[in-house]
Image: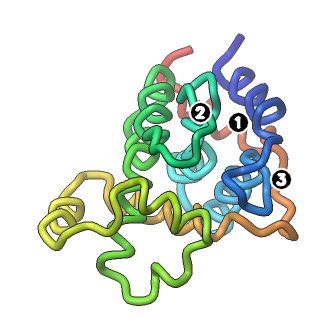
Amino acid sequence: MSPIDHLAGLFAGEGVRSYLGEDVSLATHMLQAAMLAERSGAPDHLAAAALLHDVGHFAEVGRRRGDEHVDYQHEAAGADWLAQWFPLAVTEPVRLHVMAKRYLCTVEPGYFARLSPASVHTLALQGGVLTDPEARAFEQLAHAQSAIAVRRWDEAAKDPLLAPPPFEHFADALRRLLTSS
């Protein structure tokens, strides 16, 4: 099975479940994030990172146990799993999107107030806001700006009235980004 077919199966299967108490499914959330990235004119690798940023929440990838009081580090699990097929330009924004949330809560006045209740809850599990030295260190990371972009689409991608395109809409771009199959 190709990596794209495998991902499509995850979106169509487990992806239909509830997304951490949000008003959209996991798949809808990820598809909305990719749609928002695409609408903003993002290059394929960033739209792919937006599409795949929460792949670590799938049980097959992140071995999520369903305990809402534990941080399973879905970002690292997802990035590591995706690395078997995709380049760093896709996987590193996935790996850093949680740190980007922590960063934005630290440096951008009002960002925390715009978080959904589920994002506030997970922020606490993920370590809370960064210290100033941690924020400065994050800014120096090669993929920090890409992760910040993915994070902004992530938070905006929770609208139950926004119908995203199906997974297949993004399949050709994903195929172009494959480093191996």
Give the residue at mark 1: 172
Q: Amino acid at mark 2?
A: Arg
Give the residue at mark 3: 165
**C-alpha span from label 1 to label 2:** 6 Å
Give the residue at mark 2: 176
| Badge nearest the viewer, 1 or 3 | 3
Instruction: Please name whichever residue, 167 or 68, is drawn nearer the observer in this view of the structure.
Output: 68
Could you tell me which residue is drawn at 56 percent across and 25 percent down? 63
Q: Is residue 78 above or below residue 37?
A: above
Q: Position of residue 87 (x, y in %)?
A: 42, 33
| Mark 2, other Cα within 10 Å: few <14 / some 14–19 / many ≥20 | few
Instruction: Please name whichever residue, 116 or 89, is drawn nearer the observer in this view of the structure.
Output: 116
Q: Position of residue 22 (x, y in %)?
A: 72, 61
Q: Position of residue 156 (x, y in %)?
A: 64, 70
Q: Is residue 8 above or below residue 46?
A: above
Image marks 1 and 2: residues in contact by CB distance under 8 Å: yes
Mark 3, secondary structure of its residue: loop
Q: Amino acid at mark 1?
A: Asp
